[in-house]
Amino acid sequence: MIEIERALSMILERARPRAAERLGLDQSLGRVLAEEVISDIDSPPYDKALMDGYAVVASDLRGGRDELIVVDEVAAGDMPCEPLQSGMATRIMTGAPVPRGADAIVVDECCQLDQAGGIKTVRIDDRGVRPSQNILGRGRSVRRGEPVFQVGRRLSAIDAGLLAEVGRTQVLIHPAPRVAVLPTGSELVPACDVPGPGQIRNSNGPMLCALVSSAGGQPVDLGIARDTESELAHQMNLGLQEDILILSGGVSSGDFDLVPRVLRDLGVEQVFHGVRLKPGRPLWFGVLSHAKGSRLVFGLPGNPVSGLVCFELFVRPAITALAALPQKSRPTIAARLSVPFRHTGDRPTYFPVGLVSDGDRTLARLLDWKGSADLRTLACADGLAQFPAGRSEYASNETVQVMLLERGLFGN
Amino acid sequence: MIEIERALSMILERARPRAAERLGLDQSLGRVLAEEVISDIDSPPYDKALMDGYAVVASDLRGGRDELIVVDEVAAGDMPCEPLQSGMATRIMTGAPVPRGADAIVVDECCQLDQAGGIKTVRIDDRGVRPSQNILGRGRSVRRGEPVFQVGRRLSAIDAGLLAEVGRTQVLIHPAPRVAVLPTGSELVPACDVPGPGQIRNSNGPMLCALVSSAGGQPVDLGIARDTESELAHQMNLGLQEDILILSGGVSSGDFDLVPRVLRDLGVEQVFHGVRLKPGRPLWFGVLSHAKGSRLVFGLPGNPVSGLVCFELFVRPAITALAALPQKSRPTIAARLSVPFRHTGDRPTYFPVGLVSDGDRTLARLLDWKGSADLRTLACADGLAQFPAGRSEYASNETVQVMLLERGLFGN
């Protein structure tokens, strides 16, 4: 058995960012850029009107007012025909190119059009006309050849807009790690079946797939493997095509626990088996060297709460590392125990709690736990209270750290 | 022009949860349940061993130790053949059904198997055997016919496991609202094209699609509509098949702004046009009554920062409401201005800022803004500083509220 911190560092040493791929913007949100992005154009590509109004020569309006001859009209998408000279104005719409010679846009509110006598004129009354007002000059936002994003940037929705602006509809990013999920056990049947004698439904598969999604991975549901060498080997081989393979069950020390043996036969090298942690002690971790990059293999205990604890402490950080994202610990809050707690004290222990607000304090209510196979109680948990090893008794009202679960984050 | 709060309440009055659909668990994570879920079985479906060891009659071990005859062996997935009587034990694996007559599991560490003389016996040394130890009794977690989830629950990854346990691989939920995105403007070309004279790339489309995803909606990219009545009508008609249609551009008061007119011709009823807000004043909002439920239509200003502000203040809450999720305001922090700020003060104003940590304070650095069309500066923003109407001058070091953008949330 090794310590939690040692186990995590052994995993992260082996969790390298997934090979970059060129993907569309719709698949790049929240992902990490693996290339520098250079603009292929000046942006805006022309001097652009930022308001509806009239393009003018600013010096014509030094006195604050004037009447100008309207020589042209430019909508967005048009090109101005006439260069502008002193005494002239061009009707212009937001987004349209400013005509040559013009250096300011006066907004509609300061202009009055006069079409009497067949000649269009505009009477302008604007005391504060400054050169370049309401114009975004060509290349003011980005210059051609200029880098707009560096390697390592996590792409936001706004970034998607800027990438489109500089012509990048495909970008080299570290994509979502693909994570195969394979619960094992001859007692398991698919959730859509009615269990026969001695059978139970596969609930770990759907839970782990959903946890993978919530961690930013792409789950690959491999169904169920029964406890036979050939079936395990066949299904595991499929799972080893993906970046990460999560097995559930078959890693404790029982006679029928074939999982570690079959993994070794498939060439997966064991890194550790057993962590000083409760629940979750039987955790198995290994690596397969592969032409397309290493595959990480996690053998989680089959009990759902053990599996959940191992997922949050070890698998989620691995998915984060493969996505090239910075590690972030799960949000943790301080709360007071509503009742005393006692454990053996030989291993760091995680215990499901509900959180209740009590004035300016938060109370952690230990849940009526019926053994680690009890998913129903776990579904009511807001977090996992952490009890370090070395102390076995905690008094009511003592402060403990609680790692928030997804439900605690939803706040419902 | 109406106030921000009034605009939001007019939108939310019309934003009803999207009709529920029966979907797979893989599409239900984070979604809101629209039915009560009842268990179709007792769970576990049998008295289940929680550890590897021996099933025994607890009263046999009152003295703390005994030697028992091993009569059977049960792996997970098997059914026990022999009911257990006093003096007997059954080898049992985690997850397997406990034989009739047995009422406790003694873990392997306390047992020693003896096969000498052809009869298998097990010597047990366990001072603390209690009835039901290491057994999860049939139905202890969930009883058949019992409700496990109520209407309105937001489904977590753990919930997906519990739904599988009670046989629900399809659940009635409020699915992701479908949100059509349609930038308008004859100057626009797709981002993959090189803009010709007077043309600019469509950057609002990719940005808005990514914002929709980040808000939990399902974006439907409709490309671009040029400023002609027939093209607008055709594309808008497609968009009106979805729950929400977001238009970008064409809603200010210019001569060529056909958008509100074409919308009215299509039967979309205007709810408001114009909000006391900077940037974002031209926001248009309307509703189409439709056999399959109302369609909400947002006409956002074409400038990206105006569009972003309107999205965060008005469209994101609408998506949240259609998903039947509780409204949550965007995270907001207090920060001090690093330089003085001045605005006209007639409208509540949002200004992009970068955030810098300075000891125990956070400084808001006003970004060198080149007009609201400048997506590049916006991509550097961590948040939008909020300046209420009615005051036009802010001193350096004054505290302002900053609404965090996605990038500020990523922390990169």
Image (cartoon, coloured by chain):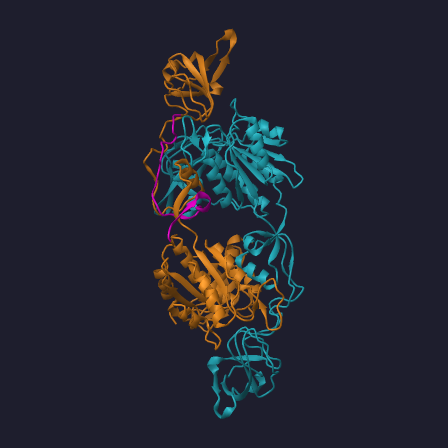
Chain colours: A cyan, B orange
Give the residue furthest to the top. B117
Which percent across, then down, holds residue A292? 65, 41
Question: For this rendering, which residue is in front, A53 or A341?
Answer: A53
> In the rendered view, does B331 fall on the left or right side of A165?
left
- Taking the image as drawn, is residue A62 in sight? no
Quadrant hosting residue A2: top right
Q: Quadrant of residue A402?
A: top left
Q: Main secondary structure of the magenta part?
A: loop
Residue A209: give x, y in percent of width and height: 49, 41
Residue B261 occupies quadrant:
bottom left
Q: Is residue B23 magenta?
A: yes
Q: Nearer the viewer, residue B127 or A133?
A: A133
Q: Residue at x 53, y 67 (%)?
A: B339
- Residue A163 versus residue A57 in the image, above or below: above
Return the x and y of residue B182 as percentages of the image width and height: 49, 64
Q: In the image, is A72 to the left or to the right of B330?
A: right
Nearest the eye: B105 or A187: A187
Report the residue at 48% width, 76% height from top. Answer: B254
Q: Is residue B162 magenta?
A: no
Q: Where residue A119 appears, x then y in whole percent?
A: 52, 90
Q: Which residues are magenta?
A: B19-47
Q: Is A327 situated left or right of B2 in this image?
A: right
In the rendered image, is residue A151 in sight? Answer: yes
Nearer the observer, A29 or B199: B199
Left or right of B402 on screen, residue A146? right
Residue found at the very far bottom of the displayed protein:
A117
Screen quadrant of the N terminus of chain A = top right
